Structures are given as C-alpha cells and as structure tokens.
Image (cartoon, grey):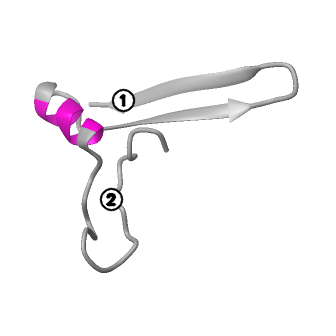
C-alpha cells in the first residue's frame, strides 16, 4: 500500500498502530474523507494505478 492504507501498521513493538504521514495529512486536510488507499498492479504490457477514498 502506497499511502499506508486504511488500517494501521501492526508490526508490533514501538510504532504499533501508527499511520503513515501522508495518510494522516489527507485525513486532517479533508475532513469529509474517512479512509483512503492507493494501489498499483503491474502486468506484462500495461499497469494500473488507482486511489480509493471513502466518505
């Protein structure tokens, strides 16, 4: 996940439950957005990049 995703990092230890800076900036800047994520898929001849935001 490029933006940290809608969930939190769960590697355990220090930092557990933290979100990425970009994820927090978007949520703080746009109050109407509750969660968002970005994804990419690479295929043989093409690729796909997308952003999903939920209100």
What secondary structure is marked by label 2?
loop
Residue 6 visible in image:
yes
Image coordinates for residue 40, horizontal then vertical, percent: 61, 32
- Bin the neighbour count of mark 2 within 10 Å (Cα to Cα): few under 14, some 14-19, many 20 and up: some
Q: Residue at x 46, y 26 (%)?
A: 51
Judging by the rendered image, the residue that carries numbered circle 2 is 8
- Residue at point 32%, 59% (across, down): 8
Q: Quadrant of residue 55?
A: top left
9 inside magenta stretch: no
Looking at the image, residue 2 sits to the left or right of residue 26; the answer is right
Q: Which residues are magenta?
A: 22-28
Q: Position of residue 22 (x, y in %)?
A: 28, 36
Could you say which is closer to the camera, residue 32 or residue 9?
9
Residue 31 appears in view: no
Residue occupying the point 43% across, 29% down: 52
Viewer-proximal residue among 29 and 35: 29
**Compared to 39, does 14 lie above or below?**
below
Residue labelled with disc 1: 53
| Mark 1 in CB contact with mark 2 (< 8 angstroms) | no
């Amino acid at each position: 996940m490029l933006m940290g995703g809608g969930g939190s990092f769960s590697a355990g230890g220090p930092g557990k439950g933290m979100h990425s800076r970009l994820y927090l900036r978007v949520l703080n800047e746009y109050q109407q957005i509750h969660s968002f994520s970005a994804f990419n898929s690479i295929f043989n001849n093409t690729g796909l990049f997308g952003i999903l935001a939920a209100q």
